[in-house]
Image (tube, grey):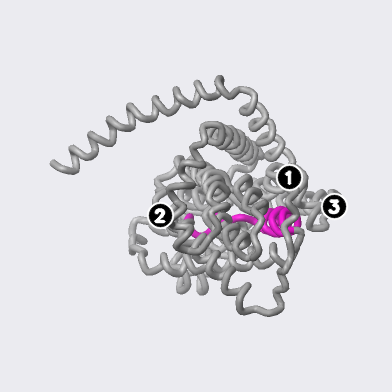
C-alpha cells in the first residue's frame, strides 16, 4: 500500500512540476531573449566547430566497423579478458575501445545496439553502459589540455586518469552482477548501415548543447547558480576548495564543456585544484550527457540509474588519481598558468590541435569505407 501511494505521489508531482518548469522556461526565454539568443548562438557554434568535426566521423566509422566481423573477432579474442575482469562478454571490448576513442555518447550507442541485438543481458548492458561511455582523447587532450591549459601533459594526465577511473568502475560493478544468461538469445551485432543513424545522433547531441547553453544563461540571469553555490560552499570548505570554483562546478555538472572552461579560468595559486575538478567533470560527463544517454537507451530496456551512479564514481576516482599523480610523480612539472582564453578560441577543431590535418582524416575515412565495401557478404554466400 505504501509503495502504491508513493507511486501515486510521484506521478502527481510529475504531472504538475514538469509543466510548471516548461512554462517557466518559455517565459524566461522571452524575458531574457537577448542573452538567450547569444547563448544559443554560442552553443550552436560550439556544436558545429567542435562536436561535429570530432565526433561525427567516429559515429559513422563505428557503424561501418560494426558491419564488419571485428565485433565477433574481438568477442572471441578478448572474452578471456573481459569476462574475468568485468564479467561481460568479449564483444563488450568493442564498446569499451570505441567509447574511449570516440567520446560521448558513442559507448552508449554501441551498448544499446548490443542489447537490442541480444549480445548482452540487461544486467551486462547496464554495467557496460556505466564504464564504456567516456570522453574521448580529442576533447581531453586537444580541447582541455592544449586548448584550455596550454599544456599537453595535463591533457595526457587527464586522459590516463579518465581511463583508469572507468576501468575501476567496471571492475567494481562486476561484484554487483547478476547471472541471467539463460534468457539471452543468440544473435549478432547488426547496426544500421546508412549514415542516417549517425546524423540523427549528432543532431540530438547538438540540440542538447544548444538547450543547455540557454538553460545556463537563464540560471545566470536569475542568479540561481549563485544561490546553489552558497548551498555547496560548506562542502567545498570541507575539501579545502576555493569558493570561486562553486559556480564553475555547478555549470560543469549541468553542461560539461562550458563548466570545464569556467574551471580553467579560476585564478588560484595551485593549479592542481583546477585539474582535479576538470578530472571529476570529465568522468561524470554532466546532466546534458546523461540526458543524451537516456535518449539513446530509451529504445531499449536499459536503465539510466546504474549509469549515473557509475559516472559519479568515475569522476570521483578520476579526481583522486589525478591528485595522487600530481603529488607523487615528480616528472609532472605543472607549475603553469591556464590560458584564460574564451572557449570559442580554445575548442575549435581539436583534430587540428592534435596535429592531424584534414587530408589525414579524409584518408582514414576512405580506408574505413573501402574496408566496409569489401566486408559486405555477397548474396550467394547469404543464400548458402
Q: Which mark is residue 306?
A: 2
Q: Is residue 323 above or below residue 95?
A: below
Residue of label 1: 342
255 or 367, which is in the foreground? Answer: 255
Q: What number is the disc on residue 40?
A: none
Seen from the viewer's position, the closer of residues 157 and 36 is 36
Judge whether 198 appears above or below 29 on screen: below
Residue 248: percent from left, percent from top = 58, 48
Q: Is residue 212 left or right of residue 140?
A: left
Along the viewing direction, whichever of 300 and 46 lies nearer the viewer = 46
> SS at mark 3?
loop
Tell me the distance, in whole angstroms, between the alpha carbons under discs 1 and 3.
23 Å
In the rendered image, residue 207, in percent from the top left (x then y), is placed at 59, 34
Q: Secondary structure at mark 1?
A: loop
Q: Main secondary structure of the magenta part?
A: helix
How many residues crowd around disc 2 within 10 Å: few (fewer than 14), some, or many (20 or more)?
some
Q: Residue 40 placed where, x, y %?
A: 64, 31
Residue in view at x 50 percent, y 45 percent: 287
> Between disc 2 and disc 3, whose residue precedes?
2
Q: Give above or below for 245 relative to 76.
A: above
Q: Which residues are magenta?
A: 128-149
| Circle nearer the N terminus (2, 1) | 2
Which mark is nearer the camera, 1 or 3?
1
**Which residue is painted at 69% across and 55% down in the image?**
144
The reply, left or right, for residue 74 in relation to residue 119 is right
- Alpha-carbon distance for marks 2 and 1? 35 Å
* Residue of label 3: 357
Other-residue count near label 1 (Cα within 10 Å), few / some / many at <14 / 14–19 / ≥20: few
The reply to whether the C-beta atoms of the residues labelled 2 and 1 are less than 8 Å apart is no
Amino acid at each position: 500500500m505504501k509503495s502504491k501511494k508513493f507511486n501515486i505521489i510521484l506521478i502527481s508531482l510529475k504531472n504538475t512540476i514538469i509543466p510548471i518548469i516548461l512554462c517557466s522556461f518559455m517565459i524566461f526565454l522571452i524575458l531574457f531573449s537577448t542573452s538567450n539568443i547569444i547563448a544559443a548562438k554560442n552553443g550552436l557554434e560550439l556544436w558545429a566547430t567542435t562536436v561535429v568535426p570530432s565526433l561525427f566521423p567516429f559515429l559513422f566509422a563505428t557503424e561501418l566497423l560494426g558491419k564488419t566481423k571485428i565485433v565477433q573477432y574481438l568477442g572471441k579474442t578478448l572474452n578471456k579478458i573481459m569476462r574475468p575482469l568485468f564479467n561481460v562478454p568479449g564483444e563488450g571490448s568493442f564498446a569499451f575501445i570505441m567509447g574511449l576513442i570516440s567520446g560521448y555518447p558513442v559507448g552508449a550507442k554501441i551498448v544499446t545496439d548490443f542489447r537490442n541485438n541480444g549480445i548482452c543481458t540487461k544486467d551486462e548492458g547496464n554495467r557496460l553502459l556505466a564504464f564504456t561511455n567516456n570522453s574521448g582523447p580529442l576533447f581531453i587532450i586537444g580541447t582541455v589540455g592544449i586548448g584550455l591549459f596550454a599544456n599537453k601533459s595535463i591533457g595526457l594526465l587527464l586522459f590516463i586518469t579518465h581511463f583508469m577511473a572507468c576501468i575501476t568502475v567496471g571492475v567494481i560493478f562486476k561484484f554487483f552482477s547478476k547471472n541471467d544468461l539463460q534468457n539471452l538469445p543468440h544473435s549478432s551485432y547488426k547496426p544500421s548501415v546508412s549514415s542516417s543513424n549517425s546524423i540523427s545522433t549528432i543532431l540530438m547531441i547538438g540540440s542538447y548543447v544548444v538547450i543547455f547553453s540557454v538553460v545556463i544563461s537563464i540560471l545566470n540571469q536569475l542568479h540561481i547558480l549563485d544561490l546553489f553555490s552558497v548551498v555547496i560552499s560548506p562542502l567545498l570548505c570541507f575539501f579545502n576548495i576555493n569558493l570561486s570554483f562553486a559556480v564553475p562546478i555547478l555549470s560543469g555538472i549541468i553542461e560539461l564543456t562550458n563548466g570545464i572552461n569556467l574551471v580553467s579560468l579560476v585564478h588560484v595559486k595551485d593549479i592542481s585544484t583546477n585539474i582535479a575538478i576538470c578530472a571529476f567533470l570529465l568522468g561524470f560527463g554532466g546532466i546534458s550527457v546523461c540526458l543524451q544517454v537516456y535518449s539513446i537507451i530509451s529504445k531499449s530496456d536499459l536503465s539510466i540509474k546504474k549509469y549515473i551512479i557509475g559516472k559519479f564514481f568515475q569522476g570521483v576516482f578520476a579526481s583522486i588519481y589525478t591528485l595522487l599523480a600530481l603529488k607523487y610523480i615528480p616528472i609532472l612539472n605543472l607549475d603553469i598558468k591556464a590560458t584564460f582564453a574564451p572557449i570559442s578560441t580554445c575548442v575549435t577543431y581539436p583534430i587540428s590541435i592534435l596535429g592531424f590535418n584534414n587530408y589525414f582524416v579524409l584518408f582514414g575515412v576512405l580506408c574505413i569505407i573501402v574496408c566496409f565495401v569489401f566486408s559486405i557478404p555477397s548474396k550467394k554466400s547469404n543464400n548458402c
